[in-house]
Amino acid sequence: MTARYVASCLFTARFPQVSARILSFLAEKHPEIEQVRCCIPRWKPQENTDRIKDQAVRATWAALPQSAAQWSAGDCAYSLCHNCTNIIAEQHPEVKALSLWELIDAEHDFPFPNCSGMTITVQDCWRTRSERKEQDAVLSILSKCGFTVLEATFNHEHTNFCGSTLYRPQPLKNPRFAHVLTIKKVPKGLRTA
């Protein structure tokens, strides 16, 4: 079994410093987890690289292998990007697609910040409707940070929220590589494609 972390182009472009810290954390604590930069082999590598404005992070990300050349039954794919997770789950059903939150939650010595006394409201993303383990890992991490957690009324499998992403056209790769999870399972009334 091979375990890989997919360092999403979208996540890295939006959160470059967090992405860099994740890569460092994995290299230090989990050198057995291979790091790759994309969920789809040879999918617009230059365009995806150009999205990352932070030059140091872009160089680090671009130095990673482009993607997994081959997945095998029993392999494990970690990601923070729901697009990547959905694409891997649909294109490679023999691979176990997990959220990186699940790995972090299982860490015994992770340096969680102390946010005691703070309250946070959590709204699950509709893309995680059927991913209760991921949702539970996020809640557990927030608890380990000391937050008092308030969950939105429509949560877990009942959520119909995804920020503004459902109000704009999907990235072309979503319906092409994860049709079932990005088109057929989109809550009725929220489809943009």
Image (cartoon, grey):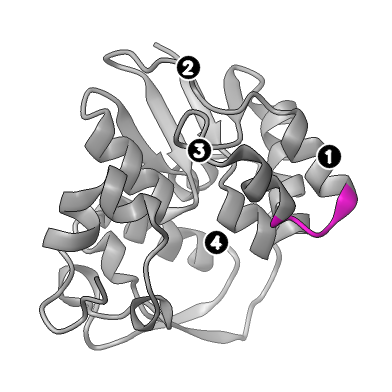
Which quadrant of the view contains residue 52?
bottom right
Choose the circle earlier in sequence order: 4 or 2: 2
Q: Main secondary structure of the magenta part?
A: loop
Separation of residues labelled 4 and 2 (CA atoms) = 36 Å
Q: Which residue is mark 4?
A: 144
**Residue at the (59%, 56%) spot, across then down:** 11
- Region rendered in magenta: 51-55
Question: What secondary structure is found at the residue carrying circle 2?
Answer: loop
| Label 4: few (<14), some (14–19) or many (≥20) C-alpha neighbours in 10 Å | some
Task: Determine if residue 24 is in view.
Answer: no
Query: x%, y% of residue 49?
Result: 70, 46
Q: Position of residue 135 (x, y in %)?
A: 34, 60
- As drawn, the label of residue 59 is 1
Q: Residue at x 18, y 61 (%)?
A: 183
Amino acid type at mark 3: Trp
Please give the label number shown on residue 69: 2
**Camera-nearest label, 3 or 2:** 3
| Element type at mark 1 | helix
Residue wearing tag 3: 43
Q: Are marks 1 and 4 in contact (CB under 8 Å)?
A: no
